[in-house]
Image (cartoon, rainbow, N blue to C red):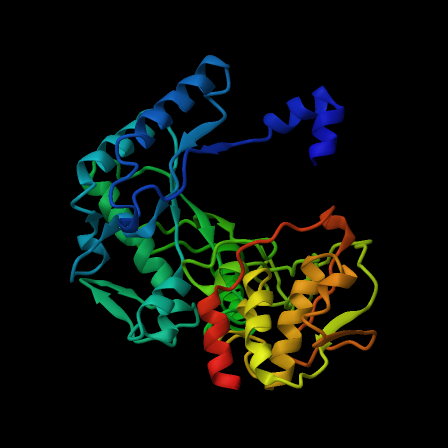
Amino acid sequence: MMEVLISSEKLASLFIYTFLHVAVGNEPFLKSYNGSFTHTVFPALKNVQRALDEAGLGDKIKASIPQNADVYDSGSGGPSEGNFRSDVRGLMIEIVNFLKENKSPFLVNIYPFLSLYENPDFPIGFAFFDGNAQPIRDHNVQYTNMFDANLDTLVSSLRKAGAPNLEIIVGEIGWPTDGDVYGNATMAKKFYDGLFKKLVASKKGSPLRPEPVEVYLFSLTDENLKSIAPGYFERHWGIFRYDGQPKFALDFSGQGNNKMPIGAKNVRYYPSQWCVFAGAKDMNMVIPNLDYACQRSDCSAMIAGGSCSKLDKNKHVSYAFNMYFQMNNQDFEACNFQGMAKIIEGNASTSECLFPIAIESAGGRLENGIGVSILVAILISLVFF
């Protein structure tokens, strides 16, 4: 894409005019930010919208601030009791009124998975759309899934802010496929199948917003250098793997056609070779080398509940060594580990755990992302050694 934009000013101009929305920041009022952005984001929003207006694009392209769903709540009540969080309520009312005046949408990121991940008492069925969860009754309305309940909590919050009809767009929604006991392809498929059936095939919204809401999926592909601070699943939101190949069958029409999405074509892989554990005379040397490999690559799939968590101890070491080897573009020196590693041509993958091969299209040597931390490597070593 970048090469195309560089080569043609006309195409770059057309690219700009395909935008419908401009996101100013992302989830700036998260509780964990402790108010760091409360004085800056709204002025930035106003400046961006003003710039769009002055460029003659304001009627088509609207600016907004993607919010996390924790910016509103309903206390101990149902969705009808929804209101913006007390510490940012005044500011949110100002922002909502600005969006209303400029006919801009309210962008919100909704993640049922995170509710399940963060709360061990959260009912699993309520995260999905099959109606198997114990329903929540709010006056005369019944809720059987978290998406509807969350969306209507926002609708109620907007009503209280004086914007009952403000357009709502879900800027991010998805389900991870690895890095957690609830993060796997089976659950991700179940979530997406239910979401598409509801919004696309059935064209249903929520009880308070009956029309289907516009949503954007997160994410297209995995991101192996993304921060794992929120959880080890953060690198595994993709519907497609790192190489553009689909992870599971998915029907975007919601009709239940169990077909694999079309994967990327002509992907250039490095040679079919893997770096694996060759054994060690002194097992005490394995732990620091395992730690070194995980810190400088991505061992998030080895976490409890991950796709590679059930490997035996030797395979765990092999997985870590191979991740480091591949993320260093199969550099021969990256498969040494003090003589404890060797390169093989037989696929080291198992039925559940993929030992990936680097792709040439990534371009150049991958920079060392801060991979699974030293703590994780230590935890793994305690379990297996």
x, y percent for residue 85? 20, 47
Residue at image position (73%, 77%) is 348
Residue 272 lies in what quarter of the image?
A: bottom right
x, y percent for residue 119? 30, 69
Query: Toward the viewer: 120 or 122?
Result: 120
Residue 96 lies in what quarter of the image?
A: top left
Residue 66 lies in what quarter of the image?
A: top left
Q: Is residue 231 visible?
A: yes
Residue at image position (54%, 69%) is 291
Residue at image position (64%, 29%) is 15
Left or right: residue 189 compared with residue 165? right
Rendered view: 137 above or below 50: below
Q: Is residue 353 visible?
A: no
Residue at image position (43%, 56%) is 204
x, y percent for residue 151? 33, 53
x, y percent for residue 364? 74, 46
Rendered view: 210 above or below 122: above
Rendered view: 82 above or below 120: above
Query: Toward the viewer: 104 or 198?
Result: 104
Number of callouts: 0
Left or right: residue 21 compared with residue 168? right
Quadrant of the image for the N terminus? Answer: top right
Rendered view: 88 above or below 345: above
